[in-house]
Amino acid sequence: MIPYSLLDLAPVCEGSDTTQAFVHMRDLAQHAERWGYNRYWLAEHHNMPGIASAATAVLIGHVAGATSTIRVGAGGIMLPNHSPLQVAEQFGTLASLYPGRIDPGLGRAPGTDQATARALRRYFDSAEQFPQDVQDVLRYFEPVQEGQAVRAVPGAGLDVPVWLLGSSLFGAQLAAALGLPYAFASHFAPDAMDQALLLYHRDFRPSKRLARPHAMLALNVVAAETDEEARYLFTTQQQAFVNLRRGRAGLVPPPIDDIEAFWEPHEKAGVAQALACAVVGSRDTVRKGIADFIQRHRPDELMLTANIFDHDKRLRSFQIAAEVMA
């Protein structure tokens, strides 16, 4: 099987708070390390009550300090919200603290709404500068050149493997042009996945950072003892997507018995499209679903994610997924 990794958003569930979310995050990371996950990534989001991973670099340090071998990184850092120098300094610091274990993944979206993007003091139109910002981050990790006025301290001269993230063709084309590893957000935006992979592999230019293309795909996996239980647990994520579309983003909701009574037909269709890359079921169902996904899309690595309300059930789901992958 190919390497498998884990994407976490530090979910804040109804009846809980961010402190408990971080306790669960640490616990999940430690279990993931024991279960053979290759990477543990956290994603930057802002102004979303159910997601506590806003200060992504801080949480990466917390997780890396609580583990010993698993790679820890960002899936991703939303570069329009940050200066390239600050990103290089933060991840240079993390890479100095935890050598060989830190993965900065860079994304072009703001990870929030436009009002919040303005509050972050880097405007959304700075996404137009994304290719240059990425190259600036890469340059800050290079050895310092004679006469260089600005350097990343720490950061300069460190071997930090930068990833590009994407949910459209833009990121695939940029990753190919720069010779960088590429992670596609197929767990919530699968429509352009096949074309993005085709462009990335076709146009890839080897670089000193990467000799051949390396593509990672994200996949929702909800595993339980039975298909019925897994479908029940999956209603948490389905509700969260509908609530977001309704403009009612809130804490992560508990699962419900009758999802059909919750949504309208057009909402159901929208969720089915957004979560098309999902494997939900018992061990056997998940084994077949993951194998079929790998066979069809041929990723070099999988990034598994699951938005499950109950922490113990979430742990069990990722454990089953790891046993299947191993």
Image (tube, rainbow, N blue to C red):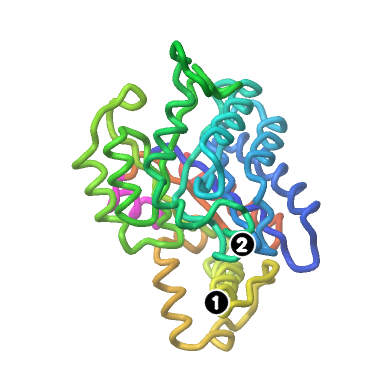
The residue positioned 45% from the left and 88% from the top of the image is: 265
Residue 297 image offset from top left, x and y in percent: 29, 51
Q: Amino acid at mark 2?
A: Thr
Q: Amino acid at mark 1?
A: Val
Residue 142 image offset from top left, x and y in percent: 44, 20
In the image, residue 165 above or below residue 161: below
Q: Nearer the viewer, residue 213 or 47?
A: 47
Label 2–label 1 contact, CB within 8 A: no
Q: Is residue 1 visible?
A: no
Frontmost of labels 2 and 1 is 2
Marking on residue 116: 2
In the image, residue 153 above or below residue 6: above
Q: Nearer the viewer, residue 191 or 117?
A: 117
| Element class at badge 2 | helix
Q: Nearer the viewer, residue 172 or 310?
A: 172
Q: Which residue is mark 1?
A: 242
* Quadrant assignment for the N terminus: top left
- Left or right: residue 138 compared with residue 201: right
Q: Nearer the viewer, residue 109 or 199?
A: 109
